[in-house]
Image (tube, grey):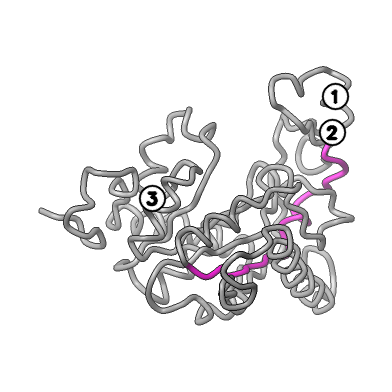
Amino acid sequence: MQPRGIAMGDVDKHETAKWDPTFTEQVKNTVGPVVNRWFRSEVRNLDNVPPAGGALAVSNHSGGIFTPDVLIFSSAFYDKFGYDRPVYTLAHYGVFLGPLDGWLRRAGVIEASRENAASALHSGAVVLVFPGGDYDSYRPTLSANTIDFNGRTGYVRTAIEAGVPIVPTVSIGAQETQLFLTRGNWLARKLGITKARVDILPISFGFPFGLSVIFPPNLPLPSKIVTEVLEPIDVIDRFGRDPDIGEVDAHVRSVMEAALKRLAAQRRFPILG
């Protein structure tokens, strides 16, 4: 029997076919409420996601090792639109090396590659990408309202090649779940671990372990998290058929940072929101 939400002909042909809408719904209904209540999460303007066709949701990444971005966005999306259209999340291959490999793929997490992104977008799905990755999620708390993708612009090329809009999405609050002191780029270089393609060695302070250099991981404080979906950007329509990748990236980040600063101005107190 064909799983609902997967088009005939796609099954068993690509990694995206591993998405299991029934399993995804179970995860949303069990883990989702815990995450959403703990962070008092609020997702605004989901109607800005185009109602049909592929869409590339580009978001900042927050919260260190316990980043809640994916669960908060996906839970709200499925609550509003149901499970006929999946949300695929692009992730570094390293997250699939552990025991959660199979579960992650069934929940729509796919390895970040041009091929996977293109397949998901051409199927009409929403693809969620965090260009800044760990570099972004460990940004210092004092720079929480800065959008910095560390020079990564591949998401722009992905949207252009797939012919889909970029949907900027911003989230605020997760950098308050503990005190992120530094990404530790200097420490990574000093210890020579950059040779192993480890560019950061973040240092944070939180509960219950106090000072942490990645490990032991502190538990996230119940900071209120607000996510806002911004108006989609049609790259070709706005920048022409041969757009400058850097120009597009700069525009996307500027739009996101302006929204993030607006959300920050609405917060009365850290953690409380």
- The residue to which callout 2 is attached is 185
User: Mark 3 falls on what kind of element?
Assistant: loop
Q: Nearer the viewer, mark 2 or mark 3?
A: 2
Say left or right for 142 vs 42. right
Q: Nearer the viewer, residue 80 or 164?
A: 164
Q: Which residues are magenta?
A: 164-185
Q: Nearer the viewer, residue 72 or 235?
A: 235
In whole angstroms, how far apart are the C-alphas of marks 3 and 1? 36 Å
Say left or right for 97 vs 22. right
User: Mark 2 falls on what kind of element?
Assistant: helix
What residue do we see at 21% from left, 61% from top?
4
Whether residue 172 is in magenta: the answer is yes
What residue do we see at 52% from left, 61% from top?
159
What residue do we see at 67% from left, 54% from top?
61
Q: Earlier in the sequence, mark 2 or mark 3?
A: 3
Rendering coords of residue 176 (x, y %) = 78, 56
Residue contact between numbered discs 1 and 2, judged by CB atoms under 8 Å:
yes
- The residue to which callout 1 is attached is 189
Whether residue 201 is in magenta: the answer is no
Residue contact between numbered discs 2 and 3, judged by CB atoms under 8 Å:
no
Placement of the C terminus among the 4 image quadrants = bottom right
Q: Nearer the viewer, mark 3 or mark 1?
A: 1
- The residue to which callout 3 is attached is 107
Say left or right for 182 vs 252. right
